[in-house]
Image: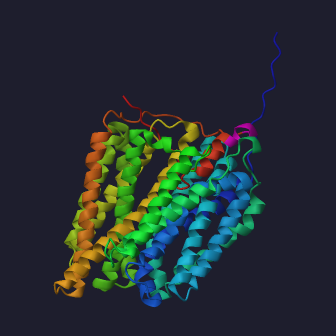
Amino acid sequence: MAATMPQQDPPKADPRRWKALSLLALVQFIIFLDATIVNVALPSIQRDLGFSEATLTWVVNAYLITAGGLLLLGGRIADMVGRRKVFCIGAGLFAVASATAGLAQNSEVLLAGRSLQGVAEALSAPAAMSMVALLFKDPKERAKAFGIWGGLAGLGSAAGVLLSGVLTDLASWRWVFLVNIPLAVIPMLLMPKLADESRAPAQGRRRPDWLGAVLVTGGLIAILNAVLNAARHSWDSAAVLTPLLAGVVALALFVVVESRTAQPLVPLGFFANRVRATANVATVFVASSSAAVFFLIVLYTQNILGYSPLRSGLAWLPFCVAFMPGLFLSTKMIMKAGPRATLATGLAVSAVGVALFTRIGVDSSYLTDLLPAMVVTALGFGMTNPAMQNAALHEVSEADAGLGSGIVTTVLQMGSALGLTVFVSLALSHQRGQQATGVAEDLAVVRGYDHAFLIAAGALAVGAVAALLILRGVRPAAPQQVDPAAAGDDGAEQEHTDGLADADHRRRPVRQGTRD
């Protein structure tokens, strides 16, 4: 009778894991909170610190660009230095940055605080996601953990809009930043007691691409400055050409560096796949349009319609509610019709919704003019998100799924910053042209917003057509069970968590489609 080998017991789960998850998810909550909480407070910030409408975009962009530009780098640093240590450093830095922004007495200090918040996100978020994966090795538990993770992220986005109105109306805009301090300090202090340190094995560890991160971030900042300056100066002026050329040179050098380094921040070959490339272009269109809608409509409701910050925040609640059915419809549609039809439909619905915003005037009604546009736009944006994520991971191996998702996040944040700058610049240019012909200021402002919305809707419509034409031959996604237990032992830890550290800290990989 053959001897039977004793069955090895699975690794014992860490009894502290759920408490650790609560702290990791709390940081995820405040990251999403800060993505929306500043929007409703923008008019108050503008009045108190003397921002112009053009420079006000940097209150949003300073956060987006630094977070997006450094996100993948932050994952590499966490792998090298230690994920728990980098998470705690990021959480502490977020508290310091929030205090800096909340106590700022001038625009320069506020923007410095917002930039530091972006750096803090780039450090803490990818480290946190890797820690969640390592703490929960059981597939069922991990699915539940990421469900809590994602739920708190969505709650943070919705809560940000409402909380911004409450804090700004009842206290001060400064509290939209100061409220983060205890929420960031608590995880920083308690996490060392609830999770062990982990890092990638030295032999498989990838080095951070410092030069690539500096070039892409600096290049985008320079180009955004040029676009904003174009609203006040001619395109052939030094104020526009100097930062524009500097930005183009920096981005060109970024491409050269990424093509030659052995461990690039963004492997350029990743975009050779037409489906993935289309998904990332669609991400730019959606991110650009959504950033413009949030920014301009907040200014419109408060500066033109005279809403209080609280009422302005409440006005966005139907948008948050309508977003969820879009997500549900998209998930169902991807399985039946594939990412091509789903993405094209979502972009088309989004285009209709944004086009409806062109109906606003100096005395518009919320129920007849704003509400329909918000609901349709939210439905469309909700439909595009899962479809973009699905297409962005087309024919990506499990080992590279984190990289693909991380790239989508970076493109999302960079696209938001670029789109916000471009559309605000277009609105301001059109507004000045209207005022030059004798149009009253409020009417000129609204016509400038309408002009920007019309172009944004056109871009989304072009994206819908492009998705239909380029994504031919992409079949509906086949159900696929991905084994999430790759981090179950030390030998497998590097492959799994390297991708996770680079991953989109806001999404998990989704099912992938296959080509004909």
Q: Nearer the viewer, residue 434 or 484?
A: 434
**Residue 435: % across, % down:** 21, 84
Q: Is 496 located above or below residue 187 in the figure?
A: above
Residue drawn at the location 50% of the way across and 60% of the way down: 250
- Residue 271, located in which quarter of the rendered image? top left
Colour scheme employed for the rendering of this structure: rainbow
The image shows a total of numbered marks equal to 0
Quarter of the picture containing the C terminus is top left
Is 303 positioned to the left or the right of 140 in the image?
A: left
Residue 34 shows in this picture = yes
Is 269 positioned to the left or the right of 74 in the image?
A: left
Residue range in magenta is 489-494
Q: Is 510 located above or below residue 349 in the figure?
A: above
Q: Is residue 158 magenta?
A: no
Q: Is 200 located above or below residue 457 in the figure?
A: above
**Residue 216: % across, % down:** 52, 59
Is 300 positioned to the left or the right of 32 in the image?
A: left
Question: Which is the main secondary structure of the residues drawn in magenta?
Answer: helix
Q: Nearer the viewer, residue 187 or 145?
A: 187
Is 389 positioned to the left or the right of 97 in the image?
A: left
Q: Is 269 located above or below residue 301 in the figure?
A: above
Residue 362 shows in this picture = no
Residue drawn at the location 33% of the way across and 39% of the way down: 471
**Residue 23: % across, % down:** 65, 63
Quarter of the picture containing the N terminus is top right
Residue drawn at the location 35% of the way across and 35% of the way down: 474
Q: Is residue 493 magenta?
A: yes
**Residue 402: % across, % down:** 56, 46
Q: Nearer the viewer, residue 70 or 45?
A: 70
